[in-house]
Image (cartoon, rainbow, N blue to C red):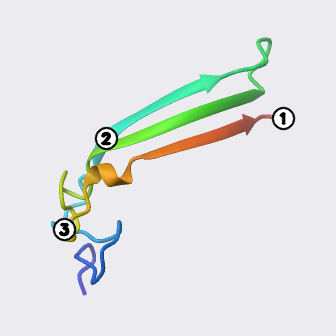
Amino acid sequence: MLKYGMSDAPSAAGNASGSLDTRGWIVEADFLPLQSSQDLKIALRYTAYTKFKGASNNYNGFGRNASDNNSVFLYVWLLY
């Protein structure tokens, strides 16, 4: 059994190269609706991968590219 090897089915978890090298960019936009305090924050975060598990293209041996894992995350942070 390979610890970081290929899986039998296409997935984000498989890895053809055996490398865990992952690279990308994270951009976040924050909105603080209460100007007098930082108790409430609404944010939007975008993660873009240029390399995932050692490769930019076909990283798992089933045609999945690093950019297929890009994500958008919207969250609300409330501090009390």
Task: From this view, report whether residue 78 is shown above or below residue 62.
Answer: above
Give the mark, 2 or 3, whose residue is nearer the N terminus: 3
| Secondary element at tag 3 | loop
| Res 5 quadrant in image | bottom left
| Res 61 quadrant in image | bottom left
Tell me if 6 is positioned left or right of 32 in this view: left
Label 2: few (<14), some or many (≥20) within 10 Å? Answer: few
Question: Residue 32: x and y, percent?
Answer: 70, 21
Question: Residue 11: x and y, percent?
Answer: 34, 71
Residue drawn at (15%, 66%) of the image: 17
Tell me if 69 is positioned left or right of 28 in this view: left
Name the residue tied to disc 2.
24
| Res 6 quadrant in image | bottom left
Question: Residue 25: x and y, percent?
Answer: 35, 36
Marks 1 and 2: which is nearer the front? 2
Marks 2 and 3: which is nearer the front? 2
Give the mark, 1 or 2, whose residue is nearer the N terminus: 2
Quarter that holds the N terminus: bottom left
Name the residue tied to disc 1.
80
Q: Amino acid at mark 3?
A: Gly
Quarter that holds the C terminus: top right
Q: Amino acid at mark 1?
A: Tyr
Q: Amino acid at mark 2?
A: Gly
Task: From this view, report whether residue 44 is shown above or below residue 67.
Answer: above
The residue at the far top in this view is: 36
Give the mark, 1 or 3, whose residue is nearer the N terminus: 3
Residue drawn at (26%, 62%) of the image: 64
Task: From this view, report whether residue 59 is shown above or below residue 21.
Answer: below
Q: CA distance from mark 1 to mark 2?
A: 33 Å
Q: Which mark is residue 18?
A: 3
